Image: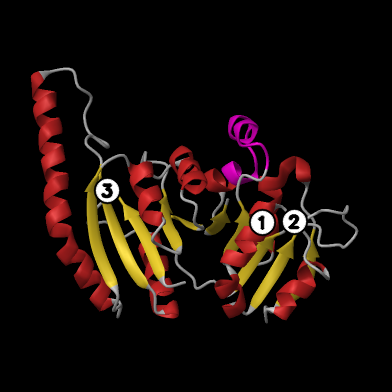
Amino acid sequence: MRDLLLPITRAYARPASFDYAAWLSAEFGASLTALYVIQAFLGGPVFDSPAVISDAIEFLREQRRAAGEGGAAFADWAQRRGLEGYHWQSAEAPFARTVAAAADWHDLVVLEADEGNECADVTALGQLVLSCRRPCLVVRSDAVFAPPRRIALAWNASAECIRAVRSSLDLLQRASEVILLGDVGRSRPRGCGDPPGGITAYLESKQVTLSSSRHRIDPDAAGESLARAAADAGADLLVMGAYGHNRISEWMLGGATRHLLQHGALPLFLQH
Protein backbone atom coordinates (compact mmCIF):
# COMPACT_ATOMS: atom_id res chain seq x y z
CA MET A 1 0.00 0.00 0.00
CA ARG A 2 2.12 2.84 -1.35
CA ASP A 3 -0.25 5.32 -2.97
CA LEU A 4 -3.48 6.58 -1.39
CA LEU A 5 -6.18 8.67 -3.05
CA LEU A 6 -8.44 11.00 -1.03
CA PRO A 7 -11.19 12.46 -3.30
CA ILE A 8 -12.92 15.56 -1.90
CA THR A 9 -15.44 18.20 -2.94
CA ARG A 10 -14.83 20.55 0.02
CA ALA A 11 -11.39 22.12 -0.02
CA TYR A 12 -11.15 23.12 3.63
CA ALA A 13 -13.31 20.58 5.47
CA ARG A 14 -11.52 17.86 7.42
CA PRO A 15 -13.99 14.99 7.97
CA ALA A 16 -13.01 11.67 9.51
CA SER A 17 -11.79 10.33 6.16
CA PHE A 18 -8.83 12.71 6.52
CA ASP A 19 -7.92 11.17 9.89
CA TYR A 20 -8.02 7.71 8.37
CA ALA A 21 -5.98 8.75 5.33
CA ALA A 22 -3.37 10.41 7.56
CA TRP A 23 -3.04 7.29 9.70
CA LEU A 24 -2.69 5.04 6.66
CA SER A 25 -0.10 7.34 5.11
CA ALA A 26 1.98 7.37 8.29
CA GLU A 27 1.52 3.66 9.05
CA PHE A 28 2.54 2.46 5.60
CA GLY A 29 4.84 5.29 4.56
CA ALA A 30 2.42 5.84 1.71
CA SER A 31 2.01 8.86 -0.53
CA LEU A 32 -1.32 10.67 -0.05
CA THR A 33 -2.99 12.57 -2.87
CA ALA A 34 -5.95 14.83 -2.14
CA LEU A 35 -8.04 15.16 -5.29
CA TYR A 36 -10.32 18.20 -5.15
CA VAL A 37 -13.04 17.78 -7.78
CA ILE A 38 -14.96 20.92 -8.73
CA GLN A 39 -18.62 20.27 -9.38
CA ALA A 40 -20.09 23.17 -11.30
CA PHE A 41 -23.20 23.60 -9.14
CA LEU A 42 -22.81 21.04 -6.37
CA GLY A 43 -25.03 22.18 -3.53
CA GLY A 44 -25.73 25.40 -5.40
CA PRO A 45 -29.01 27.15 -6.20
CA VAL A 46 -31.70 26.07 -8.61
CA PHE A 47 -31.80 28.07 -11.84
CA ASP A 48 -34.99 30.11 -12.00
CA SER A 49 -33.89 33.74 -12.35
CA PRO A 50 -30.94 35.89 -13.51
CA ALA A 51 -30.04 36.55 -9.87
CA VAL A 52 -29.83 32.84 -9.15
CA ILE A 53 -27.67 32.28 -12.22
CA SER A 54 -25.35 35.00 -10.94
CA ASP A 55 -25.16 33.28 -7.56
CA ALA A 56 -24.38 29.98 -9.26
CA ILE A 57 -21.56 31.52 -11.26
CA GLU A 58 -20.09 32.99 -8.08
CA PHE A 59 -20.40 29.59 -6.40
CA LEU A 60 -18.34 28.09 -9.22
CA ARG A 61 -15.76 30.86 -8.93
CA GLU A 62 -15.40 30.14 -5.22
CA GLN A 63 -14.67 26.51 -5.96
CA ARG A 64 -12.09 27.45 -8.56
CA ARG A 65 -10.40 29.78 -6.07
CA ALA A 66 -10.40 26.94 -3.54
CA ALA A 67 -8.78 24.66 -6.11
CA GLY A 68 -5.92 27.11 -6.42
CA GLU A 69 -5.60 28.06 -2.76
CA GLY A 70 -6.62 24.84 -1.02
CA GLY A 71 -3.32 23.16 -1.71
CA ALA A 72 -1.52 25.36 0.81
CA ALA A 73 -4.07 24.55 3.51
CA PHE A 74 -3.78 20.85 2.72
CA ALA A 75 0.02 21.01 2.87
CA ASP A 76 -0.19 22.72 6.26
CA TRP A 77 -2.55 20.01 7.53
CA ALA A 78 -0.30 17.23 6.19
CA GLN A 79 2.82 18.73 7.74
CA ARG A 80 1.13 19.11 11.12
CA ARG A 81 0.21 15.42 10.91
CA GLY A 82 3.85 14.55 10.22
CA LEU A 83 3.21 13.34 6.67
CA GLU A 84 5.95 13.50 4.07
CA GLY A 85 4.64 12.28 0.73
CA TYR A 86 1.52 14.33 0.02
CA HIS A 87 0.09 15.95 -3.08
CA TRP A 88 -2.80 18.25 -4.02
CA GLN A 89 -4.61 17.90 -7.33
CA SER A 90 -7.74 19.52 -8.67
CA ALA A 91 -10.05 18.79 -11.58
CA GLU A 92 -13.28 20.20 -12.96
CA ALA A 93 -15.20 17.21 -14.26
CA PRO A 94 -17.85 14.68 -13.18
CA PHE A 95 -16.87 13.33 -9.79
CA ALA A 96 -17.23 9.56 -10.27
CA ARG A 97 -15.50 9.52 -13.65
CA THR A 98 -12.61 11.65 -12.37
CA VAL A 99 -12.09 9.54 -9.25
CA ALA A 100 -12.24 6.27 -11.22
CA ALA A 101 -9.55 7.51 -13.62
CA ALA A 102 -7.29 8.71 -10.81
CA ALA A 103 -7.79 5.48 -8.85
CA ASP A 104 -5.89 3.52 -11.50
CA TRP A 105 -2.69 5.17 -10.19
CA HIS A 106 -3.39 4.35 -6.53
CA ASP A 107 -3.61 1.31 -4.28
CA LEU A 108 -6.53 2.44 -2.11
CA VAL A 109 -9.26 5.09 -2.35
CA VAL A 110 -10.39 6.69 0.93
CA LEU A 111 -13.96 7.96 0.63
CA GLU A 112 -16.16 10.11 2.84
CA ALA A 113 -19.73 8.95 3.48
CA ASP A 114 -22.18 11.82 3.99
CA GLU A 115 -25.85 11.70 3.03
CA GLY A 116 -25.87 15.50 2.85
CA ASN A 117 -23.34 15.52 0.01
CA GLU A 118 -24.50 14.24 -3.38
CA CYS A 119 -20.95 13.07 -4.14
CA ALA A 120 -20.77 11.10 -0.88
CA ASP A 121 -24.27 9.66 -0.42
CA VAL A 122 -25.13 5.99 -0.79
CA THR A 123 -25.83 6.25 -4.53
CA ALA A 124 -22.56 8.02 -5.29
CA LEU A 125 -20.55 5.68 -3.07
CA GLY A 126 -22.07 2.63 -4.74
CA GLN A 127 -21.11 3.99 -8.14
CA LEU A 128 -17.55 4.70 -6.97
CA VAL A 129 -17.04 1.28 -5.41
CA LEU A 130 -18.22 -0.38 -8.63
CA SER A 131 -16.22 1.81 -11.01
CA CYS A 132 -12.92 2.45 -9.22
CA ARG A 133 -11.36 -0.98 -9.85
CA ARG A 134 -9.49 -0.46 -6.58
CA PRO A 135 -10.36 -1.20 -2.95
CA CYS A 136 -12.26 1.62 -1.27
CA LEU A 137 -12.21 2.53 2.40
CA VAL A 138 -15.46 4.32 3.27
CA VAL A 139 -15.58 6.45 6.44
CA ARG A 140 -18.58 8.34 7.75
CA SER A 141 -17.91 12.08 7.92
CA ASP A 142 -18.84 12.27 11.61
CA ALA A 143 -16.95 9.15 12.72
CA VAL A 144 -14.45 9.21 15.57
CA PHE A 145 -11.22 7.76 14.23
CA ALA A 146 -9.75 4.64 15.84
CA PRO A 147 -6.83 2.66 14.37
CA PRO A 148 -8.14 -0.63 12.92
CA ARG A 149 -6.77 -2.99 15.55
CA ARG A 150 -9.81 -5.31 15.68
CA ILE A 151 -11.00 -6.05 12.16
CA ALA A 152 -14.13 -7.97 11.21
CA LEU A 153 -13.86 -9.92 7.96
CA ALA A 154 -17.06 -10.95 6.17
CA TRP A 155 -16.35 -14.24 4.39
CA ASN A 156 -18.52 -15.98 1.82
CA ALA A 157 -15.89 -17.29 -0.65
CA SER A 158 -17.10 -15.05 -3.48
CA ALA A 159 -14.65 -13.59 -5.99
CA GLU A 160 -15.29 -10.12 -4.55
CA CYS A 161 -14.61 -11.37 -1.04
CA ILE A 162 -11.36 -13.04 -2.10
CA ARG A 163 -10.20 -9.79 -3.69
CA ALA A 164 -11.11 -7.91 -0.50
CA VAL A 165 -9.04 -10.33 1.61
CA ARG A 166 -6.04 -10.01 -0.71
CA SER A 167 -6.28 -6.22 -0.90
CA SER A 168 -6.58 -5.80 2.87
CA LEU A 169 -3.79 -8.18 3.91
CA ASP A 170 -1.50 -5.35 5.03
CA LEU A 171 -4.20 -4.14 7.41
CA LEU A 172 -5.18 -7.65 8.54
CA GLN A 173 -1.57 -8.47 9.38
CA ARG A 174 -1.25 -5.34 11.53
CA ALA A 175 -4.46 -5.99 13.46
CA SER A 176 -4.32 -7.35 16.98
CA GLU A 177 -7.32 -9.54 16.15
CA VAL A 178 -9.33 -10.49 13.07
CA ILE A 179 -12.85 -11.80 13.58
CA LEU A 180 -14.35 -13.95 10.83
CA LEU A 181 -18.02 -13.32 10.08
CA GLY A 182 -19.97 -15.88 8.09
CA ASP A 183 -19.77 -19.59 7.43
CA VAL A 184 -16.08 -20.54 7.51
CA GLY A 185 -16.65 -24.31 7.42
CA ARG A 186 -14.99 -26.52 4.81
CA SER A 187 -18.11 -28.33 3.58
CA ARG A 188 -18.57 -26.16 0.50
CA PRO A 189 -19.41 -27.40 -2.99
CA ARG A 190 -16.56 -28.18 -5.34
CA GLY A 191 -15.51 -25.19 -7.44
CA CYS A 192 -16.12 -22.60 -4.71
CA GLY A 193 -13.64 -19.92 -3.77
CA ASP A 194 -12.14 -21.50 -0.65
CA PRO A 195 -8.32 -21.61 -0.60
CA PRO A 196 -6.55 -24.92 0.20
CA GLY A 197 -7.22 -25.72 3.85
CA GLY A 198 -9.95 -23.09 4.09
CA ILE A 199 -9.88 -19.39 4.83
CA THR A 200 -8.68 -19.91 8.40
CA ALA A 201 -5.58 -21.80 7.31
CA TYR A 202 -4.91 -19.25 4.58
CA LEU A 203 -5.01 -16.29 6.96
CA GLU A 204 -2.89 -18.06 9.53
CA SER A 205 -0.29 -18.76 6.83
CA LYS A 206 -0.18 -14.99 6.23
CA GLN A 207 0.50 -14.28 9.92
CA VAL A 208 -2.96 -12.88 10.55
CA THR A 209 -4.06 -13.14 14.20
CA LEU A 210 -7.50 -14.77 14.17
CA SER A 211 -10.16 -14.79 16.83
CA SER A 212 -11.43 -18.18 17.93
CA SER A 213 -15.01 -16.91 17.82
CA ARG A 214 -17.29 -17.49 14.82
CA HIS A 215 -20.29 -15.46 13.77
CA ARG A 216 -22.86 -16.82 11.33
CA ILE A 217 -24.68 -14.27 9.19
CA ASP A 218 -28.37 -14.37 8.35
CA PRO A 219 -28.48 -14.45 4.51
CA ASP A 220 -31.99 -12.96 4.49
CA ALA A 221 -30.81 -9.85 6.35
CA ALA A 222 -27.10 -9.87 5.61
CA GLY A 223 -26.49 -6.13 5.99
CA GLU A 224 -28.13 -5.84 9.40
CA SER A 225 -26.61 -9.13 10.52
CA LEU A 226 -23.08 -8.10 9.50
CA ALA A 227 -23.39 -4.71 11.17
CA ARG A 228 -24.65 -6.27 14.39
CA ALA A 229 -21.99 -9.00 14.45
CA ALA A 230 -19.16 -6.55 13.80
CA ALA A 231 -20.43 -4.24 16.54
CA ASP A 232 -20.82 -7.13 18.98
CA ALA A 233 -17.24 -8.15 18.25
CA GLY A 234 -16.01 -4.64 19.03
CA ALA A 235 -14.52 -4.25 15.56
CA ASP A 236 -12.91 -1.00 14.36
CA LEU A 237 -13.24 -1.89 10.66
CA LEU A 238 -15.31 -4.24 8.49
CA VAL A 239 -13.69 -5.82 5.42
CA MET A 240 -16.00 -7.32 2.80
CA GLY A 241 -16.51 -7.97 -0.88
CA ALA A 242 -18.87 -5.46 -2.47
CA TYR A 243 -21.87 -6.24 -4.67
CA GLY A 244 -21.33 -9.97 -4.89
CA HIS A 245 -24.84 -10.64 -6.23
CA ASN A 246 -26.44 -9.40 -9.42
CA ARG A 247 -25.67 -5.71 -9.28
CA ILE A 248 -28.95 -4.49 -10.78
CA SER A 249 -31.18 -6.52 -8.50
CA GLU A 250 -29.04 -5.74 -5.44
CA TRP A 251 -29.07 -2.02 -6.16
CA MET A 252 -32.79 -1.92 -6.82
CA LEU A 253 -33.89 -4.17 -3.99
CA GLY A 254 -31.20 -3.46 -1.41
CA GLY A 255 -28.47 -5.76 -0.26
CA ALA A 256 -25.71 -6.01 2.31
CA THR A 257 -23.40 -3.51 0.60
CA ARG A 258 -26.06 -0.85 0.14
CA HIS A 259 -27.37 -1.31 3.69
CA LEU A 260 -23.92 -0.91 5.22
CA LEU A 261 -23.06 2.09 3.05
CA GLN A 262 -26.26 3.80 4.13
CA HIS A 263 -26.61 2.69 7.74
CA GLY A 264 -23.33 1.18 8.91
CA ALA A 265 -21.41 3.03 11.62
CA LEU A 266 -18.09 1.25 11.11
CA PRO A 267 -15.54 2.18 8.43
CA LEU A 268 -15.85 -0.23 5.51
CA PHE A 269 -13.05 -1.70 3.43
CA LEU A 270 -14.81 -2.69 0.19
CA GLN A 271 -13.58 -4.44 -2.93
CA HIS A 272 -15.70 -5.25 -5.94
Stretch of the chain drawn in magenta: 245-259
- Which residue is pictured at 34% across the width and 68% down the height? 32
For badge 3, the amino acid type reads: Val
Residue 50 magenta-highlighted? no
Side (left or right) of 112 relative to 47: right
Determine crowd level at label 3: few under 14, some 14-19, many 20+ residues with C-alpha closer than 10 A.
many
Give the x, y percent position of residue 170. Answer: 56, 74
For badge 1, the amino acid type reads: Cys
- Give the residue at mark 3: 37
Side (left or right) of 134 relative to 60: right
SS at circle 1: helix
Task: Indicate which disc, 3 or 2, sits on the residue closer to the N terminus.
Answer: 3
- Give the residue at mark 1: 161
- Give the residue at mark 2: 157
Cα–Cα span, label 2 and label 1? 6 Å
Q: Which mark is residue 143?
A: none
- Which residue is pictured at 47% across the width and 41% down the height? 127
Residues at marks 2 and 1 touching, judged by CB atoms closer than 8 Å: yes
Q: Quadrant of residue 119?
A: top left
Q: Quadrant of residue 215?
A: bottom right
Residue 247 magenta-highlighted? yes
Q: Is residue 163 visible?
A: yes
Cα–Cα span, label 3 and label 2? 36 Å
SS at circle 2: loop
For badge 2, the amino acid type reads: Ala
Give the x, y percent position of residue 157. Answer: 75, 56
Cα–Cα span, label 3 and label 1? 30 Å
